[in-house]
Image: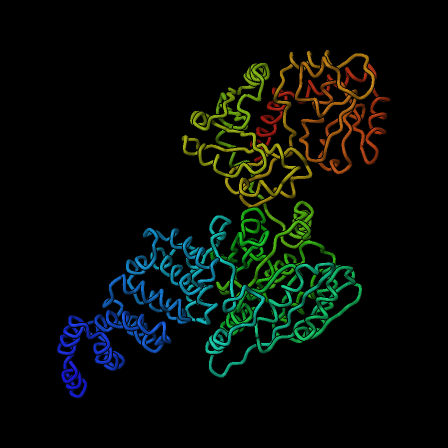
Amino acid sequence: MGPALALAQSAPLAHATLAGIAGLLLIHGGLDEAVALLRPQVARAPSPALVAPFIEAGLTVFRRTINDGADLGLLTAMADCAIACPTALQTSHRRELIRLMESHSLGRRIPGLAAACSSIERVALFDTPADSDALVAHGLVLTAGGRFYRARAAFEAAHALAPTNLAAGLNAAFAALADGDVDTARAGFSLIAPGDEATVAQVAWPRAGNTPWPWAPMPPAMRAGFGALLPPGASWPRISLVTPSLNQGDTLEATILSVARQDYPNLQYIVLDAGSADASRAVIARHAEHIDVAVLEPDRGQVDALNKGFALADGALLGWLNADDMLAPGALFALALAALSEPDADIVHGACLVLRDGGLVGLQVPVADGRGLDTAGLADIHGRWLRGAYFLQPETLFTRRLLDRVGGLDASLHYTPDYGLWLRAAALGAGLAGTAWPSAIYRLHPAQKTAARRAMLAEQVAVRDRLAPLSPPDPAPLLHAAMANSPLRLLVMPHPAEPHAIADDAVAEAVVALAAEGVALRVDAAAQSAGGADLVVRITRAHDGPAWVAAIRDAGFTGPVIAWLFEDASDPIAHAEIATVVDLLLPCHAAAVPFLRNPHAAVLEPLPPPIIGLGARQAAQLFAAAKGPRSGHAAPDAWLDVAARFERRLTARAALIAPDEPPNSVYETLLAGQVPVVFAEYDAGTPSTLEASLPILRHTGDASRALALAEAGFDAAGAARRHAYAAQHHLLARRLLTLIGRLRAITVRG
């Protein structure tokens, strides 16, 4: 074959002729000669006819070289040919090339080879079903094993197979970014949407090169990729970041490094510590080279520290990064590019990943619904804010001119200075610029301020009501048609977890009492029973969600739906979704009304729930069993035999009512003739209709002392008066009559 090979190499031949000669060489075992013949040809002009025999021969020839020093040039040539002509290869050859590249530190070419294939061919490279989720799972396994290039190829195959698979898209974009492929990452991030825990839990932790973020410097290729995106003649805007810290040494280092590893060329970083007693000061000292200004002095809280920091800032773009959050890879470049693209914008935002217990659990994409920044939207706490329509905060920057216009952050706010800033910015007509780039990682943990959800929401509601008060819907038009029917067909739906909680005696009494007022009452927990009703009242507990409303509508009901919120005091935030789908909210506590106010559902006057488990006859039996001489603080056997469910609430002649218990606890205690003793924190939620002769004792200290005070107020006449009050006002029939009377009054006023 020597003379023939020499002739073929010396004279230009058509590809078909070269392929024919190579085929003869392969048949007769001239693999080295075939490689020598084809290698220069495919380097100049790769074609399927030449690449196929070149790869077939080259794989065998390369394996022969491994023991005496692998011919990496040959392997590289085969990889380049395969990328140029992917259709020329058999699937087995592609797999073998990937294995060899991974084994010989040429893995960086693996994603390119996979990307050159069709979607079906990509899937065939992996031993997984042709399913996007299976490919993502396979990619996560490869990532955990440090096989990052093969993992990237798996993620990109999953994304090509299912472009709307958020986990596939995020994984593919982060893997490309880790390799320095900023253009591919940017294109991938542009397609992302908000993600829940089940989806984002399938996203691998971001990397810089092969090291988890933020524990390694930004790779030069990544830095160069961002530099290539800077518009001609532009310069990177000056950014000033402020980090306030107090006793957060366990997370502060990651925060500082996430800023330092940005490698952003025009950054001022300011860190303030108010006097930490943990390792924070040591962390700040250890990373002094990454910090431009360190302020180590007491302050009056986070907002005071932030205002101090902003007074020292010299950037055109400002932001703050709390000591338990992080910037994501490339965040400052992405935000700066967004700001350069819209120079009139005052707020620049990216997307924000959510971290809990070391794993990603969510992705929030601000204004993904396209409504932008407006006071009405920000004021809709239930319909938009709590559902992730806006910012988690660390993914945002704002201009110095905006901060100066609003006069700095509101120092009176403890939990929500960012919300106050956004509301004031919206009122000024501030412009918004955004990028889908995941720009920050927001950490959830029990020690953070916002973990105090009730206190945080209370402050947010107060800020909302001061800066952008809502105009709630008028309930009269919603009720007018239904209330005009005679008889009014009322369906009361018990909670589905307790479909038989309303005693038969209570229902029978209520049916008779309401019939006298022109109301036909039915009690049924099944959504299908709503079809023939004029008005539906459903007993709703926290975290029920909105699906039950859809079930009622599917049953053919078109009238008003009232959610009677039995747990509005214990968790008003949990009613956020319900408020957006029902027509009217019926709270139990006056203190819950500001939390519930929204532009979607009218909020009715608070009405504590009935003692739904009892009718008048049963109530009398319980009172008879509860009274009588007793000693100590153990509930009597007779009482427990009749009503074991009161065991925890009633002790001797008084009941200690915990702050998160429903008002039923108060009325059940009165029904037993006893004196309720409630914790001080419960005061805001305690029903205000009790007569002065029926006191509620405030427990602010020693429990035994509170019980003793209740004992002192116990006598036969007082017990009877307490029982009579509860029986008259708080059983089912009376509560429903009160509700119907109020609804009719609304329609008359309307």
Residue 145 image offset from top left, x and y in percent:
47, 59
Image quarter for residue 717? top right
Q: Is residue 115 left or right of residue 53?
A: right
Residue 680 image offset from top left, x and y in percent:
78, 36
Residue drawn at x 60%, y 26% as measured from the top left: 741
Which residue is nearer to you in this view: 637 or 382? 637
Residue drawn at x 40%, y 70% as measured from the top left: 104
Image quarter for residue 105? bottom left
Q: Quadrant of the N terminus?
A: bottom left
Q: Is residue 713 left or right of residue 291?
A: right
Which residue is nearer to you in this view: 146 or 5? 5
In the figure, 576 relative to 633: above or below? below
In the picture as drawn, the residue positioned furthest to the front comes out as 68
Residue 545 image offset from top left, x and y in percent:
52, 39
Residue 667 image offset from top left, x and y in percent:
70, 24
Residue drawn at x 14%, y 77% as measured from the top left: 21
